Image (spheres, grey):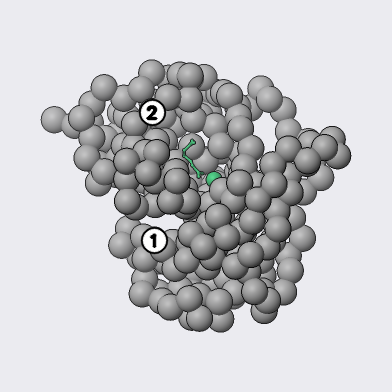
């Protein structure tokens, strides 16, 4: 029988100790993988961390096609994963981190599972440039779809830039990620499903289906834009 708790403990320990773990050998369904994610995050909550929102992954058609899936994946964000804008981080905290330029949404209202693009836009308190630090806990950053879902969709840390008024068109915002002043990645918010609000609509649907509907004050990382 599948031991969800022990797989969750293995992944939680790998994240806690920043030590890579082999890919899962157990045959997980997608539902099992989300159960492992939930159990693994419950261990963080038991250590005092608080859920502050969710992250969306595989939000571009190209990435979905690459992974052979037709659905986005998601993971939970906690206050312990938040890094203040301008702060420093230690590589010792991560296994093999990578960074993705993203867009973050802040909700002023709860979002039910079925919501239109207009409804999602009306629930926003702010929109901000953001960075997601993904850090697969699997050796060599190699995983299957169910492996990565079990591993909180590789989410590790996130940084939110200044909040902006969401009453603007978000469908084609230019995005440049610089390292030491040098542009390294250039893209558009249109890479996120043509409009990052679509990712928010999907986040509302998936969060409600998991029994954890989006709440006022939640942060949603909309997915990679480059
Ligand atoms: O878009 C994402 O945040 C993808 C996360 C999972 C896949 C990966 O680790 O590359
Ligand atoms: Mg991401």
Q: Residue furthest right?
A: 181
Q: Residue furthest left?
A: 1
**SS class, disc 2:** loop
Q: Position of residue 36 (x, y in %)?
A: 32, 39
Q: Which mark is residue 145?
A: none
The vertical placement of 202 against 224, above or below, is below
Res 9 quadrant in image: top left
Q: Return the residue nearer the eye: 107 or 140.
A: 140
Q: Is mark 1 within 8 Å of ligand 1?
A: no
Q: Circle 2 is placed at which residue position?
A: 143
Q: Position of residue 225 (x, y in %)?
A: 59, 51
Q: Is mark 2 within 8 Å of ligand 1?
A: yes
The vertical placement of 76 against 172, above or below, is above
Q: Position of residue 34 (x, y in %)?
A: 32, 45
Residue drawn at the location 23% of the way across and 26% of the way down: 26
Q: Circle 1 is placed at which residue position?
A: 207
**SS class, disc 1:** helix
Q: Can you see residue 164?
A: yes
Q: Is residue 144 left or right of residue 51?
A: left
């Amino acid at each position: 029988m599948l031991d969800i708790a022990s797989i969750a403990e293995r992944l939680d320990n790998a994240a806690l100790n920043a030590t890579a773990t082999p890919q899962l050998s157990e045959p997980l369904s997608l539902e099992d993988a989300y159960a492992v994610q939930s159990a693994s995050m419950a261990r963080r909550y038991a250590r005092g961390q608080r859920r502050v929102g969710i992250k969306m992954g595989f939000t571009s058609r190209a990435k979905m096609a690459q992974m052979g899936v037709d659905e986005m994946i998601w993971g939970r964000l906690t206050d312990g994963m938040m890094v203040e804008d301008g702060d420093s981080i230690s590589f010792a905290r991560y296994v093999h981190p990578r960074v993705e330029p993203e867009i973050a949404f802040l909700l002023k209202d709860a979002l039910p599972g079925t919501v239109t693009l207009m409804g999602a836009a009306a629930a926003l308190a702010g929109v901000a440039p953001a960075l997601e630090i993904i850090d697969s806990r699997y050796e060599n950053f190699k995983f299957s779809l169910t492996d990565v879902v079990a591993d909180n969709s590789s989410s590790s840390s996130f940084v939110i830039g200044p909040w902006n008024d969401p009453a603007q068109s978000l469908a084609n915002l230019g995005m440049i990620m610089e390292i030491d002043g040098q542009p390294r990645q250039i893209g558009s918010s249109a890479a996120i499903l043509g409009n990052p609000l679509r990712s928010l609509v999907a986040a509302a649907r998936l969060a409600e289906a998991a029994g954890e509907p989006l709440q006022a004050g939640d942060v949603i990382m909309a997915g990679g834009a480059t």
